[in-house]
Image (tube, rainbow, N blue to C red):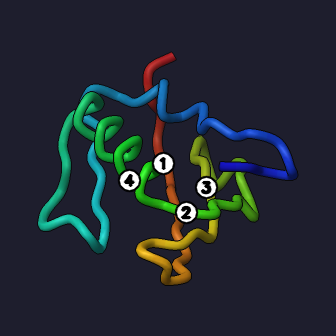
Amino acid sequence: MTYLGNPYHPWWLDNLAEDATSEGAALQGAVQGARNVRAVVLAARELYGHQEISFAGDYGDGGFLELHTCQIHGEPTKVHSQRSGEGPE
């Protein structure tokens, strides 16, 4: 995954609150807990091809937003990751 031509690792992935949740179109229900959210995000990244971040930065009050395009099974896809609220310090 790259952002502005450089390798990219989302900082927020290492800073999830223990009660973090994640939802997505491919999930049936929500994933709960920092360890589970981290595992799903990392597994999903392995499925994405040609990942390119178009934006990664602050969003609202204490939030963070990522927008990226990728391919899943050869099909173009757009993904957004949003972190809101405050995680652990």
SS for dot 3: strand
Q: Nearer the viewer, mark 2 or mark 1?
A: 2
Sequence order check: which comes first, mark 3 or mark 2?
2
Residue type of the residue flagged with mark 4: Ala
Q: Quadrant of residue 76?
A: bottom right
Q: Nearer the viewer, mark 4 or mark 3?
A: 4
Sequence order check: which comes first, mark 2 or mark 1?
2
Q: x, y percentage for residue 56?
A: 71, 52
Q: Residue at x 40, y 41 (%)?
A: 42
The furthest residue to the right: 5
Residue type of the residue flagged with mark 3: Leu
Q: Which residue is mark 1?
A: 84
Give the spatial CA distance, label 2 vs label 4.
10 Å
Q: Residue at x 50, y 55 (%)?
A: 82
Q: Which residue is mark 2?
A: 49
Give the spatial CA distance, label 4 vs label 1.
20 Å
Sequence order check: which comes first, mark 1 or mark 3?
3
Q: Which residue is mark 4?
A: 44
Sequence order check: which comes first, mark 2 or mark 4?
4
Q: Which residue is mark 3?
A: 65
Give the spatial CA distance, label 4 vs label 3.
17 Å
The furthest residue to the bottom: 75
